[in-house]
Image (tube, grey):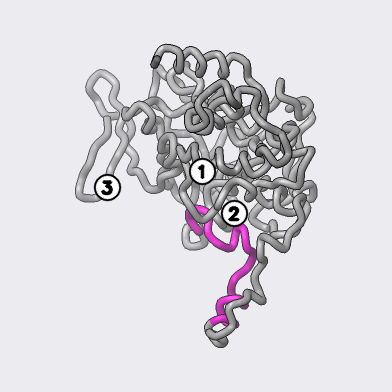
Amino acid sequence: MMQKTDSGIYEASFINGQQVNRERIDLVTGGVKGETYLYWKENELFELPVSYDKTKSKWIVSPGFDTTIASFDRMVNLRCMECHASYAKTGPGKVASFSGESVGFDKSSVVLKIDCERCHGPGRQHAEYQFSNPDIKTAKYITRIQSLSQTQQTDLCGTCHSGTQTDNSRSIFEFKPGDKLADFKKRAASAGPPDLKHLDVHGDQLEMLKTSKCFSASKMNCSSCHDAHKKQHDEALYFAAKCETCHSNANHKLCKMTGKIDAAVLRSKCIDCHMPLLPSKAIVNEQQSVMIRTHHIGVYPDETSKILQYLKAKK
């Protein structure tokens, strides 16, 4: 049961009408396809058993949770925080754990969401200098993304978007722009080779992109298509325009459907055809895989067929 009171919003579980667990929603993660909620217990964070699916506008059992009993003991570890927060100082957990590996967080140190410093590096000296020199508009003590090489840029994005099946030797919170991702995390041997058979569309966007000819045959990087300062979800035409910077008449790298489908329609379906939504093996809601857009840019005959059938039905 979801309960709203003057002190906050709670998730409570009942057995035979008797309340057995009740915890307040202290933090919210996600926000695009859905939301998952966390609560503090001593200095540890735990995931709550009910999440919200924005695509279906309804409450769901949190992905990976038992659907027959409400569990309140799934601990949030450092790796979760490294991708869903900008910083958190860790320490020994104060809640007893069967695994003996509980990790706690200093609440006062937690920097929620992803802030400027995660991508541009430490900002104190930058802020002090710019405040003291307001007429100088060129950044001096902060990393400009354009100054980084292709590998450095993709490594930066890869701190969060290179999958969870990794062996981490250092905390991602220590990563600075320009650092080598391999010095912090490497693909675990148990995850298998980095090919399409073993990669998952959730969280492994960087490795997916590296399997694409568009990436290997060019100097593109994540910011070639994405503006990290804007919300760009569902902007199909925006991303299609990015594709057209390479796939144009000038270099003859045109889609094979050019001339067969109306140009405006072709452009609107460009992303759905070549970067379709595919089922994730890592995130399953109510026994159904969550659909996430793949970052392996390629030709998907089944998706092309679906779109052609859709267009034919509209005539």
Q: Earlier in the sequence, mark 2 or mark 3?
A: 3
Whether pointer 2 and pointer 3 mark residues with C-beta atoms closer than 8 Å, the reply is no
Amino acid type for the residue under numbered disc 3: Gly
Residue 97 marker: none
Q: Within the image, what quadrant is residue 30 found in?
A: top left
The picture places residue 262, in percent across and down from the top left corner, at: 50, 26
Q: Earlier in the sequence, mark 3 or mark 1?
A: 3
Chief secondary structure of the magenta portion: helix
- Under circle 1, the secondary element is helix
| Any part of residue 177 in sight | yes
Viewer-proximal residue, 23 or 136?
Answer: 136
Left or right: residue 163 compared with residue 63: right
Viewer-proximal residue, 228 or 201?
Answer: 228
The answer for how far apart the CA atoms under marks 2 and 1 are is: 44 Å
Tell whether position 125 is magenta: yes
The answer for how far apart the CA atoms under marks 2 and 3 are is: 27 Å
The picture places residue 290, in percent across and down from the top left corner, at: 49, 25
- Under circle 2, the secondary element is strand
Residue at (59% x, 63% y) in the render? 117
Task: Give the crowd class for mark 1: few <14, some 14-19, many >=20 residues within 10 Å.
Answer: some
State the extent of the magenta-drawn residues as a range: 111-130
Q: How many marks?
A: 3
| Any part of residue 292 in sight | no
Q: Which residue is mark 1?
A: 238
Viewer-proximal residue, 244 or 288?
Answer: 244
Q: Which residue is mark 3?
A: 8
Q: Which residue is mark 2?
A: 91
Q: Within the image, what quadrant is residue 127 found in?
A: bottom right
Task: Give the crowd class for mark 3: few <14, some 14-19, many >=20 residues within 10 Å.
Answer: few
The C terminus: image quadrant: top left
- Under circle 3, the secondary element is strand
The picture places residue 40, in percent across and down from the top left corner, at: 42, 47
